[in-house]
């Protein structure tokens, strides 16, 4: 049986060049589906990669209890002081606690590509922030001077938004700011933000002595539970603590779900068309080899071997289409940077499309599935072809 399948399949594959036109229809159709499938889902992969890069295992995120984002949280100065004394929080060489109380607001600023206004995150920080966010480094210009209306911009924000260059003067509301530096932080979400002195930002937005989050450094990942239990046990605090990786992983779940649902719907709709293309291609292949198939059947080749040979040809054509579509998607989209709205924080997040190996593997599997479904009806027809009738056909 195996030798029959190999023999018939080999004949089918050698004859593909004689049917190059019809075979190309299936290849192009499936490659188009794979291209769109990979392109759309690479957005979700890129957003997920950005959030994953933000999850330092030694950083704890502290918000008001019941808040799921910084935008809905609020902490007073006294609460920040109590958090400083929490057991388990790491300390620097002088014994000062490594915590960073921060204020998060959004400002209107246009995108470079479209010129349309966008919600750009503006984060107020204290000098201790640069000890907590210890991966951050200035790549252009200088760091901000505290006590002045100065900002530094993440390099992703600088690429996506208008006029975010060193030396530019920017005005939001009644305040004027000077951009003095560009920073990077390992591809994290912070690179989509602008940073300034929290003590300057508070009066500019009439926030008093309030913050929205506290980032705390811990010595080892195991210290997290001690910090969380200490905060929970303190009756003067109503806060929740979570690992930074957990927080950032939850921040784009809505966005990623929307993208994956839309991508799935598009892939299914386009996939139906590609399957019909594969059906037509394989029916044409079977029709052009009617006498050939009948002769093989008359010589003793089984119907099963004919079915398998047709399916293998269909899957191989689909695999070629999948490889072509995946390669084009990788070359065109991998690393392409853009920005979109994060519906949970109501601010823009800059990210790069990520065409990952696992995504390409899923796309190739989907391509072969389309080929299999497209080749099945013609394969069954070939197997059921009456031998005597087929031999009489011209």
Image: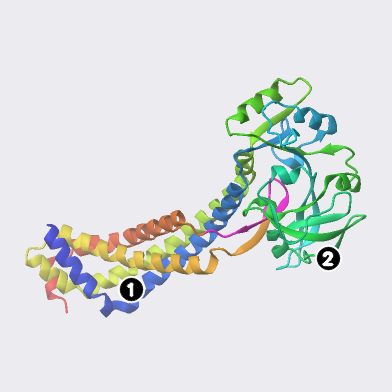
Image quadrant in which you'd find residue 6? bottom left
Q: Left or right: 259 with respect to 176?
A: left
In depth, the one of 99 and 382 nearer the eye is: 99
Q: Locate residue 124, reporting x and y percent.
A: 80, 47
Q: Is residue 352 magenta?
A: yes
**In the rendered picture of this protein, how many numbered marks are placed on residues?**
2
Residue range corresponding to the magenta coloring: 341-354
| Residue depicted at 63% across the width and 25% down the height | 226
Image quadrant in which you'd find residue 116? bottom right
Q: Left or right: 283 with respect to 251?
A: left
In which quadrant of the rendered image does the C terminus lie? Answer: bottom left
In which quadrant of the rendered image does the N terminus lie? Answer: bottom left
Q: Residue 9 — which label?
A: none
- Give neighbour class at mark 1: few <14, some 14-19, many 20+ (Cα, 10 Å): many
Q: Is residue 55 magenta?
A: no
Q: Residue 23 — which label?
A: 1
| Residue depicted at 14% across the width and 66% down the height | 7
Q: Left or right: 50 with respect to 324?
A: right
Q: Residue 168 — which label?
A: 2
| Residue farthest along the left direction in this orientation | 299
Colour approach in the figure: rainbow
Question: Vertically, is 235 above or below 135?
Answer: above
Q: Locate residue 13, reporting x and y percent.
A: 23, 71
Q: Locate residue 150, reporting x and y percent.
A: 85, 56
Q: Is residue 16 visible?
A: yes
First in sequence, mark 1 or 2: give its number.
1
């Amino acid at each position: 049986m195996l030798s029959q399948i190999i023999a018939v399949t080999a004949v089918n594959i050698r004859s593909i060049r004689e049917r190059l036109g019809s075979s190309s229809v299936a290849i192009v159709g499936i490659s188009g589906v794979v291209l769109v499938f990979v392109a759309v889902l690479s957005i979700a992969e890129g957003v997920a990669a950005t959030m994953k890069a933000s999850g330092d295992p030694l950083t704890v995120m502290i918000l008001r209890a019941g808040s799921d984002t910084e935008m809905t949280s609020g902490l007073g100065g006294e609460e920040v002081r109590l958090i400083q004394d929490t057991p388990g929080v790491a300390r620097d060489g002088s014994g000062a606690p490594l915590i960073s109380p921060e204020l998060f607001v959004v400002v209107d600023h246009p995108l470079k590509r479209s010129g349309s206004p966008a919600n750009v995150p503006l984060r107020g920080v204290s000098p201790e922030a640069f000890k907590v966010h210890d991966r951050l480094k200035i790549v252009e210009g200088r760091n901000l001077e505290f006590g002045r209306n100065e900002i530094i911009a993440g390099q992703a924000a600088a690429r996506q938004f208008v006029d975010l260059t060193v030396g530019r003067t920017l005005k939001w509301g009644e305040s004027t700011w000077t951009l003095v530096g560009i920073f990077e932080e390992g591809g994290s979400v912070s690179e989509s933000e602008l940073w300034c002195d929290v003590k300057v930002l508070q009066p500019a937005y009439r926030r008093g002595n309030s913050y929205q989050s506290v980032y705390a450094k811990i010595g080892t990942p195991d210290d997290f539970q001690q910090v969380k239990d200490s905060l929970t046990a303190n009756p003067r605090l109503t806060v929740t603590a979570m690992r930074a990786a957990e927080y950032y992983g939850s921040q784009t779940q809505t966005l990623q779900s929307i993208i994956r649902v839309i991508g799935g719907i598009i892939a299914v709709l386009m996939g139906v068309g590609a399957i019909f293309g594969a059906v037509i291609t394989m029916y044409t292949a079977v029709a052009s080899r009617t006498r050939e198939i009948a002769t093989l059947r008359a010589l003793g080749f089984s119907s099963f071997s004919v079915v398998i040979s047709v399916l293998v040809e269909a899957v191989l054509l689909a695999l070629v289409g999948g490889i072509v579509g995946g390669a084009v998607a990788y070359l065109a989209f991998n690393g392409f940077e853009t920005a979109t709205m994060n519906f949970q924080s109501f601010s823009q997040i800059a990210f790069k499309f990520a065409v990952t190996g696992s995504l390409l593997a899923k796309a190739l599997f989907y391509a072969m599935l389309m080929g299999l479904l497209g080749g099945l009806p013609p394969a069954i027809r070939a197997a059921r072809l009456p031998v005597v009738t087929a031999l009489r056909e011209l």
